[in-house]
Amino acid sequence: MSKEGRKPEFKALAAGLVAESCRESRCLAYGLGCSVEAHEYVFIEHYVNEATAGVAAALMSSFS
């Protein structure tokens, strides 16, 4: 399946990831942005320290 065909799956997974991440006590802010053309997505993460960051990248690696 093409990446374009997986967009709904990605958006659902990303929305759940954003919601879960925002509930973490070590997470100060977490969001998802996309380009005007909606071809590129960016996670914006702000954690208490670097040791607690990076979880989203590991979880989303199947979409790279």
Image: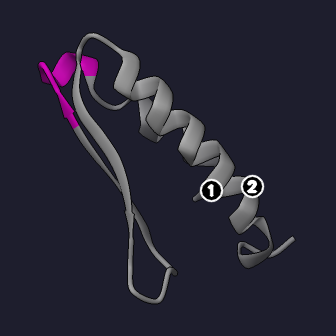
Residue type marked 1:
Lys
Q: Name the side, left or right, on which 52 lies relative to 36.
A: left
Farthest-out residue, top: 25
Residue at 45% over, 74% down: 40
Farthest-out residue, right: 1
Q: Which residue is mark 1?
A: 11
Q: Which residue is mark 2?
A: 9
Residue at 74% over, 55% down: 9
- The residue closer to the viewer here, 64 or 24, is 24
Residue type marked 2:
Glu
Q: Position of residue 25 (x, y in %)?
A: 27, 10
Q: Give above or below for 34 relative to 23.
A: below
Farthest-out residue, left: 49
Q: Position of residue 49 (x, y in %)?
A: 12, 20
Q: Position of residue 47 (x, y in %)?
A: 19, 26
Element type at mark 1: helix
* Quadrant of the frame with the N terminus: bottom right
Residue at 56% over, 46% down: 14
Q: Name the side, left or right, on which 49 lies relative to 61.
A: left
Element type at mark 2: helix
Residue at 26% over, 18% down: 52
Q: Quadrant of residue 4?
A: bottom right
Residue 48 falls inside the magenta stretch: yes
Q: Give above or below for 61 relative to 48.
A: below
Range covered by the magenta-colored residues: 46-52
Q: Characterize the local packing of mark 1: few (<14), some (14-19) or many (20 or more) Cα atoms within 10 angstroms.
A: few
Q: Position of residue 10 (x, y in %)?
A: 66, 55
Q: Name the side, left or right, on which 26 lies relative to 34.
A: left
Task: Give the number of callouts.
Answer: 2
Residue 22 falls inside the magenta stretch: no
Question: Could you tell me if the residues under marks 1 and 2 are in contact, i.e. CB atoms within 8 Å?
Answer: yes
Q: Label 1 to label 2, Cα distance in Å?
A: 6 Å
